[in-house]
Image: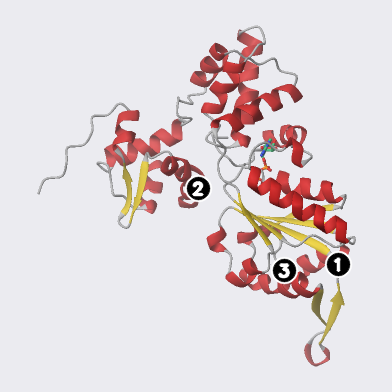
Amino acid sequence: DRIQSPDVSVEDDELERSLRPRAFGDFVGQRAVKEQLSVAVEAAIARGEALDHVLLAGPPGLGKTSLAQIIATELDAPFVQTAGPALERKGDIAAFLTALEPGSVFFVDELHRLPRALEETFYPAMEDRQLPITVGTGAGARVVTLDLPPFTLVGATTRTGLLTTPLRDRFGLQHRLDPYDHDDLAAIVRRSAAILQVEIEHQGAEAIAARSRGTPRVANRLLRRVRDFAEVRMGGVVTREAADAALRMLEVDDEGLDRLDREILRSVCVTFAGGPVGLSTLAAAVGEEQDTIEDVYEPYLLQRGFLQRTPRGRCATARAFTHLGLPAPAPEQG
Ligand code: ADP
């Protein structure tokens, strides 16, 4: 598993459950989103109605699942969870929807990976709480419409662009989570350390935050690795020195780049002379899936100004050359 990946690993699973914020008050940062959602939740409770459907967009590891669970907790409603790729047939959706208790929060992660043909099943369910299903086959087939209980669909997606407009438009509340700033990440690290009963110094939390790529999931994972190191080598306290030494050992650099990030950059800088290089060529050169590069590695490299996207492909910036200790490329002739 890649240490700096914002995706969940098996190892993360248990840890994430224990560290997951349970109420809006525990959820660090994202003030505007939190405020708007908590107002909507309170209003729904006051009216005794189900909350409007919610779409949460943003890169992996920023707290979409946590927010969905918080919404359910604050509504005091049952939470039911699935993911786009798990819904293969119309019957899969029907099974979930017909089993919902009134008022439930139905969380569908990776909504953009829901098969297109199934999107339409959600339309009447979201709008009118109705589910038309076909019973019987051949000449005897007929459509019956089932009434569904009130529910709130919370959809999460890393790529809003891949949702069709009709589906997107059916979400009354739409929010985008952006990467966290340094102070929020340090606060998340301190909060997690307190839950894990790890003694951490202010500067230790800062050092972890600085390399967390704006992502709470990465921050928590780094904290755990640093804790191991601190326990084994430094007497248990997460100091700045412990964090620095542990992260050096893990080959995570000052910018939070790991070995594969640097390999990608090096490939663009050296193998492709700074670019432009097409995504598929780059993927082949570093031996990774094109999708993985685009969803997992590239966003942070773009965000930190190491890579640029141009119509002809990816280009390395001067900052990338400097970071890798390479001489800046000669300006193009002519
Ligand atoms: P996503 O669903 O967007 O991939 P998650 O909700 O699973 O992200 O968050 C990953 C982990 O990061 C959670 O287990 C939680 O511990 C932590 N986390 C995310 N957002 C926050 C936050 N705002 N405050 C505190 N911890 C957070």
Mark 2: amino acid: Thr
- Which residue is drawn at the image coordinates 51% and 44% (left, top)? 296
- Label placed on residue 292: 2
Residue 165, picture quadrant: bottom right
Left or right: where does residue 28 sit relative to residue 143?
A: left
The reply to whether the C-beta atoms of the residues labelled 1 and 2 are less than 8 Å apart is no
Residue 254, picture quadrant: top left
Viewer-closest of 132 and 104: 104
Work out how far the residue at label 1 is from the one at label 2, CA to CA, in angstroms: 35 Å
Work out how far the residue at label 2 is from the one at label 3, CA to CA, in angstroms: 26 Å
Q: Tell which residue pokes out farthest to the bottom in this image.
A: 139
Q: Earlier in the sequence, mark 1 or mark 3?
A: 3
Q: Earlier in the sequence, mark 1 or mark 2?
A: 1
Mark 3: amino acid: Arg
Q: Which residue is mark 3?
A: 89
In the displayed structure, 109 sits above or below 221; it is below
- Which residue is drawn at the image coordinates 80% and 69% (left, top)? 94
Q: Is residue 81 visible?
A: no
Q: Which residue is mark 1?
A: 98
Q: Is residue 265 visible?
A: yes
Regarding mark 1 in the picture, which secondary structure is present there?
A: helix
